[in-house]
Image: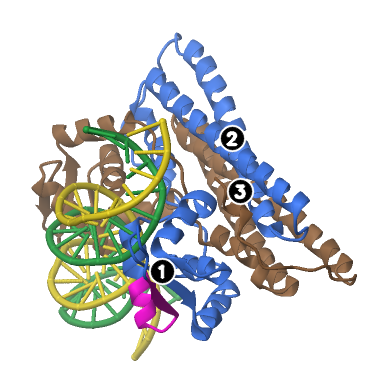
Chain colours: A brown, B blue, C green, D yellow
Amino acid sequence: MSLKYALLGVLSMREMSGYDIKRHFDRAVHFVWNASDSQIYRELRGMERDKLITSRLIQQESKPNKRLYRLTDAGSAELDAWLVSPVETPYSKEPFLLRLFFMERLSDDDARKLLEARLREVESLLDVAAERLSTYSDVSRSAQPERLWWQTRLVEGMRRTQSAEGAWLRELIRDLDSRRSARAEPDAGSGESDDPADTP
Amino acid sequence: MSLKYALLGVLSMREMSGYDIKRHFDRAVHFVWNASDSQIYRELRGMERDKLITSRLIQQESKPNKRLYRLTDAGSAELDAWLVSPVETPYSKEPFLLRLFFMERLSDDDARKLLEARLREVESLLDVAAERLSTYSDVSRSAQPERLWWQTRLVEGMRRTQSAEGAWLRELIRDLDSRRSARAEPDAGSGESDDPADTP
DNA sequence: CGAGACATGTAACCTGTTACATGATTCC
DNA sequence: GGAATCATGTAACAGGTTACATGTCTCG
């Protein structure tokens, strides 16, 4: 249901076509939200039907015609109402964490490879965040000062949590290695039993 | 597509009914994955059709009958293949972060309320994680030592990233307050312009 | 007597992904 | 000549949510 609000949000900045929105998503909004172009076009039509946005057709020569959307008053009100509505419980569906949960099935070697791959992903996200922050600070220096305050803070927050994940992954890899050494020792019994980890 | 693997994962631990799985999800797997009961039942039937699991019907008196599922060899192989498959790019759709992106539309007062609500959510998740860790350490002390190694590490990782988010939120609230004071000052022009933050 | 555990499902709907279709212009 | 940009869509499918239906037993 949030794509709707993402669209209201970007349209609150300026009038845009579906294509413009997709580009803006890919560039600026990408790390907090994204959607395929077909989904964007479909949603825009639905929102126009619901009177949250209106559109006007722009005739162009040497380029395909396009349809520019902007917020109606109802759309603007809907966006503001959403912004102050109660926060959702942040319960994530992270495929990587799900894997970790069942990682005991894997050899330490395979597990290590996976952790390293994830670490590389996290580090590349950190690079993207750093890039974004430097773009923001350029903009703020040159033109308006107060603008992009929230965007800057947001990216800074993502940098921090990604950083924490990276540190955790590095420790985990290290501990996995030392466990691997300790594993050359005897093997105590590992019996069958009902899972006591099931307790809430 | 990951629900399938979550189901294969829990069934790899022991034979379970749809109902058992739902309960196990709510308790132990909850913070990495969850699903509604109707989705679980539907998916189980599909997986049985695909020969990843088999089931047997258990007649019960004084309780409804139930259907217990367990992995086939094919299911077990599918799970292992998934566990070592390339990691997905962790690009998140976090409604809260999306809100932050458009927060300039809100008064500082409203924004502050939102940040505080999120902080409370994060803190309650930290409590859940702490609880989970103490359960795990009880189990490890009493019975098998090596068991739950990955689960423990996983929860520890979530604790860390949640912690980082909490720290960031607290700073953000503090800075918002000091910005609020500085706002009692004059107001420089904020004109219309094409968005330079659009640069990739 | 009502609430909650146990147990499984159907139906409708919304959201998201992928593949395909079209076609001019511009840049290398 | 081929790729990228501009521009909008359809169709089919997969994944996920919500509401509803059914019925027994147990515990407070």
Task: Reply yes or no: does residue B47 show up in magenta.
Answer: yes
Q: Amino acid at mark 1?
A: Met
**Chain designation of label 1:** B
Residue labelled with disc 3 = A162
Q: Secondary structure at mark 3?
A: helix
Q: Which residues are drawn in magenta?
A: B44-58
Residue B127 is labelled as 2
Residue B1 is labelled as 1
Position above or below: A34 against C9: above
On the image, which quarter does residue D5 sit in?
Answer: bottom left
Same chain for mark 2 and mark 3? The answer is: no
**Front of the two marks 2 and 3:** 2
> Residue B94 vs residue A1: left or right?
right
Task: Reply yes or no: does residue B56 show up in magenta.
Answer: yes
- Give residue C3's position: percent from left, percent from top: 32, 35
Between the residue at mark 2 and the residue at mark 1, the CA separation in whole angstroms equals 30 Å
> Residue A114 vs residue D26: left or right?
right
Q: Residue furthest top?
A: B184
Position above or below: B21 against B31: below
* Residue visible at 36% across and 25% down in the picture: B190
**Front of the two marks 3 and 1:** 1
Same chain for mark 2 and mark 1? The answer is: yes
In the foreground, B143 or A126? B143
On the image, which quarter does residue A100 sit in?
Answer: bottom right
**Chain designation of label 3:** A
* Residue visible at 34% across and 82% down in the picture: B49
